[in-house]
Image: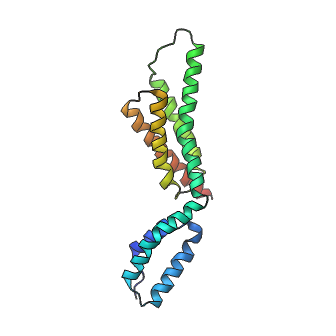
Amino acid sequence: MSGPPVVAVWLVRACCPARDRRFVLGDLEAEYVLRGRPSRWYWRQALRSAGALVMMGLRRADWEYALLAVMLASAAPALLMEAWWSFLLSTVPLKADIVRGADFAFVSLAVTALLAFGAGTICTLRGLLLAIPAAWLFALLGQAAVHNLVPPWFAVATLAALSAALAGGACLRRRFA
């Protein structure tokens, strides 16, 4: 006998919070067997349940940690780097040049990656679905607001650093949790 459709099961697994996953999948499989194994019924249930399962997970703490991770990963580097640059300009005489060099870019990317990795350690893998796109948005808005003009390569490098570091931190959390 065949089991439920694999892709539909994967959809339910992806949408369902980890602590409820085995119960939801168990109930769906039991009903699937009672109904005579109709694949269309299982697909309909999986598709109808996806939104509710995602919202159930968001009502719990996943979204709060994801939003905290977004703030740490995207807003903090922009604020820290702007404060550092203002301090540098105020202490070094005749360094009133508005152009920031490669050293600023590399330090900014390093601070972004470090803070994003730390933020990723408080974010679940499921929370990354919210954290990474929101971090991209906030980082780009922060760069536009603080630096006035951001070269395209720096914006792309920031988004790559945010994504990799958030995912790396979340994977580290999962490994040691």
Residue placed at 54% from the left, 45% from the top? 70
Along the line of sight, the residue nearer the viewer: 145 or 24: 145
Percent of width and height locating residue 80: 58, 31
Q: Is residue 93 left or right of residue 163?
A: right
Q: Which of 20 and 121 is in front in this view?
A: 20
Q: Residue 139, position in %: x, y?
A: 48, 39
Which residue ends up furthest to the top in the rendered image?
Answer: 94
Q: In which quarter of the image is residue 76?
A: top right
The vertical placement of 141 against 164, above or below, is above
In the rendered image, the vertical position of residue 23 relative to residue 96, given as above or below: below
Residue sitting at 48 percent across and 55 percent down? 129
In front here: 69 or 169? Answer: 69
Q: How many labels does the image show?
A: 0
Q: Quadrant of the N terminus?
A: bottom left
The percent coordinates of residue 149 (x first, y second) are: 41, 27
For the point 52% across and 40% down, the residue is 74
Q: Which colour scheme is used?
A: rainbow
Q: Which residue is drawn at 49% across and 80% down?
A: 28
Quarter holding the C terminus is bottom right
Where residue 90 appears, x then y in whole percent?
A: 59, 15
The image quadrant that residue 175 belongs to is bottom right
Q: In this view, does 30 lie above or below 55?
A: below
